[in-house]
Amino acid sequence: MPDSNLQKMTMNGKSSNAKYITAEEGGTQVEFAGPQMSGTRRGPARWSRVEQMLTLACLLLTIIVVVLIIMIVTSTASHDKSKVSRKKPVLAASIDGGYPIPDDLELTNICLTPGCVNAASRLVTTMDSSVEPCNNFYDFACGNWNKKNTIPDDQPSYNTFSKLGDEIQVILKSYIEKDVDLTKDSNSTAKAKHLYRSCMNETQIDSEGLTPIHEMLADLGGWPILEGTAAKPRTQADVLDLLIKLNLIDQNVLIWQTVSADDKDSSVNIIQLDQSNLGMPVREYFLDEVAAARRTVYQKYMHDVAVMLGADAETAQRDVEEMMLFEIELAKITIPSSERRDNEEMYNKMTVGKLQELVPEFDWLVCLQRLFGHVGIEITDQEPLVVYAPSYLAGLGKLYQSTDNRVIVNYLLWRLMMNWVNNLPSQYRNIKNEYIKNIFGSQADPPRWAECVSFVNMKMGNALGRLFVEEHFDESSKDTALEMIHNIRDSFYELLDEATWMDEPTRIVAKEKADAISEKIGYDDSILVDNELNKEYEEVEYYPDRYVDNIITFLKHTASSKLKNLRTPVDRTKWSTSTTPAVVNAFYSPTKNQIMFPAGILQPPFYSKHFPKYLNYGGIGMVIGHEITHGFDDRGRQYDKDGNLVKWWDDVVIHRFKERAQCIIDQYSNYTVPEIDMPVNGLQTQGENIADNGGIKEAYRAYRKYTQRQHTQEKRLPGLLQFSGDQLFFINFAQVWCGVMRPQASINRIMTGVHSPGRFRVIGTLQNMPEFSEAFQCPAGSYMNRKERCSVW
C-alpha cells in the first residue's frame, strides 16, 4: 500500500512507494518519526558558534554559582539545622527556582561531566520557564526551541530530527568528499564516492544540457506533448509497453507493483499490486473546490516543464488540461488512507488468471511475463499475487478503456518528468519553485552538496553507512540499547498483565509475540565485511562524470533486485534497505515482528552513554517502547509472532480493544492545530498515538525499576537542580518533539500523515499518564491532568 506523501522530491524522482512506509518487507512497516522528520543539512536554523559558546559559558558560570550556593547553604545548615525549612513545591517549575532545590543536595549529587553539562545546556536553552508545565507541557519544554529555530528556506519544517539529521549529513559529507583510497575503501565505498562526485559535477551536467533527458524520453517511446499535432497516434499496446518500461526503471505510475513478503505467509515473497501515488501529496487537492488554486499551480508546473523541454505552448495547454482531468478521475477511484487500516480487508490473494477476470482491460499475464522475463523468471496464469486495492484496479481498467491513449502516455511521462527536474542542469531547476512553495511551503532549493549527500545515502545507504559507523558510531551503544530493550519489554509484559479487558488465552499469545520480537541495532554487521558489502552493489558501476547514466543504472538495479526476490525466500536476518545506518528514525516490521534502531538515532538527544539514565529512557527508551507497542496497535495486532496476518484475538477482546482505541481516536480528534485551524485526524493517526502512549509508559516503568535496583537517585543536572530524575525524564521526552512547520506542511501532514503533530504527541500522551501529573504535582482538572484518560496499553 503506497505512501502518498511526496513531501520532498527525491534526486531520482522516486517517491516512497510502500504499503505503509516501505514495501520490501510486506506488511505495514512503520517508522517512528514519519517521512517529514528526516533531515538534511541546514545551517541557517542552527545557533551560531558564538551563541553556542556563550550558552556554554553561561551554564558554566551557573554551575559555579550553584556550587557556591550549595556550599553556603550546607555551611549554614550545619550551624543551625533548625532554621532550615523545606518549601512546598509550587506549580511553576521555572529554571530560576519554581521547584525548590532540595535542602540536602550535596555537590557530589550533581553531575558535572561534559556529557551532563552539554545535556543540561540543551535542556535549559530549549525550555521556556515562563510557562507552567501543568498548563501546557509542550510549550514549557519546547518554548525556547521554537522561538530560536527558524525553518530553513529549503525545508517545509524543522525539528529535533531535522537538526540531528543535519549534523549527520555534515559528517557524511566529510567522509564522502575524501578522495578514493584504494588501501582503505571497499569497492562499494569507492562507488559511493564516484556517485557523489557525479552529482556534484554541475559543470558536466550543465554542459550536457537537456540532451540526456530527450534521449531518455526517446528510449521510452517519446512524449506526445513535445511532438505536438505531429505526434503519431498511441495505441493501448503503447501504453502497456510504457508501463513496463517505467517499472523497469523503478517508476510505479498508475499501478504500484513490488515483490515482498506475503502477509499471510511471511517467509515467502509474492507479487503485490496496489494503487499508486498521485502527483500532488493530498488526494483532496484534486477533488475539493477549496483546493482549486493548488490545481492551478500544479497544472502550470505541468505546462512549464513541457514548454521548457520544447513543447508548443498552445498545444501543451490542451494536453495539460486533458492530463489534469484524467488525474482528477484517478483521484476519485483512489482509496483514502483512512479507509486502508484494516489489513485483513485490504489483503486479496488471487492468481493472475483471477485478476484477469476481475480487471479484463489489461493483459496481466503478458505484462508480468515481460516484466519478470527481464530477470529470467517465468510467470503463468496460476502465479499467485496479492491485490490491495481491487476496486481501484477495476476502476482503473474502466478509466483506461475510456481515455485517449495519448492522454495516458502524456500523463505517465509527466509523472516521470515532474520528479526528474532535480536532475536537470542548474539553470532549469528553479522551474519547480512555485509549485514547491505553494504545495509544500519550501522557499528555495537546498545546497547542492546537501542534495547530493541525501541522494547517495538513499541510493547506497549501506556503503555510506559503513563510513559513518566506522568513524562515528560508539559500539557500546548496541549493548546498552539491547539491555534497554529487555527492560522495556519487561514493562510491556506488565501492561499485558494489567490489561483487564484481555482474556487469559489472548494474553498468553500476546506475551509470546512480545517475547518473539527480534531487534536490529545500529547497522547490519555484514556492511563491515568487504565481500558482503560489495555483493550488494556488484551489479552497478558509477562514473564521476556521468550523472544521468548513474541514476538510470541505479534505478534499473533497484527494479531488477525487487523482481529477483520473487523466487527467493524472505531473509529475516537482513535489514530492510530503507533502514540504513545513517537514518534518524526507528522502525517496526510486522511481517518480521522486528524492531530496528539505526545508528543515526542512537545519538544525542535520544541517547548517549554519557547521559544519566533518566535522559536515555526519556529519549531512546521511549522510542524503543513505541516500536514494541506497534506490534500491538490497530494494525500490528493483526499479525502473529511469526509475522503472519492471522486472526489470533477473540472477537470479544477485539471489541474491547476497539473501544479503547476509539477513546484515543476521539481524544486526538479534539486537538486543533492553531496555525491552520485544522483538527488532528484521530482515525488516521491512531496507530502512532497508541504506540506513543504505550511507549512512554513502558520507558518510564523501566526507568523507575532501574532506580529501584540502584537504591538511589541519579545525580541531578547543573542549572536544573530543582528537577528530579522523573521530571527530567518527561522533559527530555517532550524535547524530542520540539519543532516548527510551515502552514502548508502542516496541512499536508494533517491530511495525509499517520503521525500527530509533535505538540500533540507530547500533550496527548502525558494527559493520559497519571505518573506525569504526580511528578509535576499537577492539580486535578488542570490542562495536563485531565479527568478522563484513554489507555489501550
Image: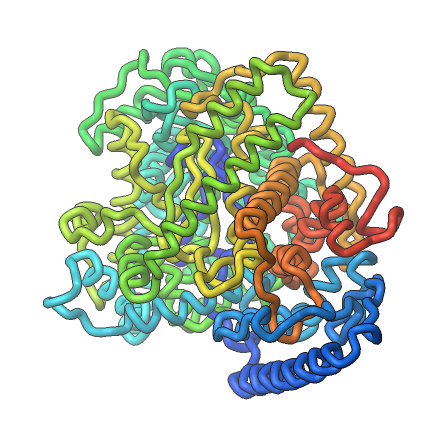
Closer to us: 457 or 514: 514
Q: Give 188 or 303, whichever is nearer the viewer.
A: 188
Using the image as rendered, state which of residue 590 and residue 424 is in the foreground: 590
Query: Does 56 appear above or below 785?
Result: below
Return the residue nearer the eye: 400 or 564.
564
| Residue 328 visible in rendering | no
Residue 721, image x and y in percent? 67, 70
Q: Is residue 500 found left or right of 175 in the rendered image?
A: right
* Residue positioned most to the right: 781
Locate residue 727: give its quadrant: bottom right
Q: Quadrant of residue 690?
A: top right
Give above or below for 31 relative to 89: above
Can you say which quadrant of the picture contains the C terminus?
A: top right
| Apparent side of residue 542 relative to residue 94 in the rendered image (left or right) | left
Task: Estimate the x, y position of residue 394 in percent, counting from the top left.
Answer: 52, 21
- To which quarter of the image does residue 51 belong? bottom right
Protein image colouring: rainbow
**Left or right: where does residue 725 sit relative to residue 202?**
right
Residue sitting at the far left: 183
In the picture provided, is 374 more to the left or to the right than 741? left
What is the count of numbered marks? 0
Residue 100 drawn at (x, y percent): 77, 69
* 571 in relation to 783, above or below: above
Residue in the image at 87% along x and 47% along y: 780
Residue at (65, 75) in percent of width and height: 719
Q: Is residue 463 visible?
A: yes
Residue at point 74% right, 63% down?
139
Q: Position of residue 142 (x, y in %)?
A: 68, 64
Q: Residue at x 59, y 64 (%)?
A: 158
